[in-house]
Image (cartoon, grey):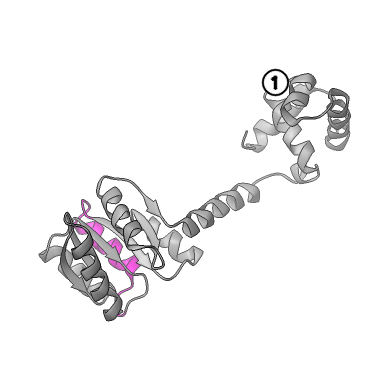
């Protein structure tokens, strides 16, 4: 596997090159770029299989460099390796076509394993980045939920979703570990808050709001 390193921190990138060369016999560092423009140029000449790309670099940043490289050489894999875990950087890098987003506190073993995984088509992200992506996903979903959903308590929301799936009060009681009468009380409260009288109306509300079930 031919790897191009792109990072403006010379000490870091030189050290990374030595680590990869000594610990992974199947990895060959075929070039080092110290800015985004140089990364674009080298990707044409050294023909890497994968590029480890920093985000903030002079002349051309890592996101734009990734975009330009993949426009010309879509078969190349790009994996970001950076100190920055800002939501915007993560979103822009993955949107530009990067196959992964690792932080520089990753161990050498994690970087090497991620290189191999990305070469085979997997998407690799650091655990910190994965948490941010999940938070962004839930924030996006919650931003589109209707006001009536937030008028319910967390337990009532859970029961509404189960009602919309057709579960009976007894089934719901088993699932949420409550007494059946307690669940029936919750259902009465839900009907009153939402101004509905039937389960069919509940199902219609949930479907129209596209609440994840």
Mark 1 residue crowding within 10 angstroms, few (<14) / some (14–19) / many (20+):
few
**Residue 102 horizontal/vertical position (percent):** 39, 61
Does 27 sit left or right of 186 as displayed? left
Is residue 61 magenta-colored?
A: yes
Q: Dot 1 corresponds to which residue?
A: 166
Which residue does the image show at 64% across and 51% down from the upper left? 143
Q: Which residue, as the protein is rendered here, is positioned at the far front? A: 23
Q: Number of callouts in the render?
A: 1
Mark 1: secondary structure: loop
In terms of image quadrants, where is residue 58? bottom left
**Residue 21 horizontal/vertical position (percent):** 18, 64
The answer to whether residue 108 is above or below residue 205 is below
**Which quadrant of the figure contains the N terminus?**
bottom left
Q: Which residues are magenta?
A: 58-76
Which residue does the image show at 41% across and 67% down from the upper left? 105
Q: Nearer the viewer, residue 166 or 24?
A: 24
**Residue 207 horizontal/vertical position (percent):** 65, 31
**Residue 100 horizontal/vertical position (percent):** 36, 55
In terms of image quadrants, where is residue 70? bottom left
Which residue does the image show at 26% across and 51% down from the upper left? 116
**Which quadrant of the figure contains the C terminus?**
top right
The answer to whether residue 144 is above or below residue 166 is below
Is residue 45 magenta-colored?
A: no
In terms of image quadrants, where is residue 191? top right
């Amino acid at each position: 596997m031919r790897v191009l390193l792109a990072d403006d921190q010379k000490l870091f990138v030189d050290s990374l090159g030595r680590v990869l060369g000594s610990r992974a016999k199947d990895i060959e560092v075929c070039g080092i770029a110290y800015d985004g423009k140089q990364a674009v140029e080298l990707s044409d000449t050294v023909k890497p299989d994968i590029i480890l790309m920093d985000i903030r670099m002079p002349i051309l940043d890592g996101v734009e460099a990734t975009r330009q490289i993949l426009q010309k050489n879509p078969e190349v894999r790009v994996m970001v390796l950076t100190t920055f875990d800002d939501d915007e950087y993560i979103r822009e890098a993955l949107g530009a076509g990067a196959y992964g987003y690792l932080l520089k506190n990753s161990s050498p073993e994690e970087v090497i394993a991620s290189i191999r995984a990305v070469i085979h088509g997997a998407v690799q992200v650091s655990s910190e980045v994965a948490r941010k992506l999940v938070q962004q996903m839930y924030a996006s979903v919650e931003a589109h939920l209707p006001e009536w959903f937030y008028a319910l308590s967390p337990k009532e929301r859970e029961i509404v979703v189960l009602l919309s799936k057709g579960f009976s009060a007894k089934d719901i009681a088993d699932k949420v570990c409550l007494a059946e009468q307690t669940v029936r009380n919750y259902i009465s409260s839900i009907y009153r808050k939402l101004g509905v009288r039937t389960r069919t109306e509940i199902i219609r509300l949930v479907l129209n709001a596209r609440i994840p079930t």
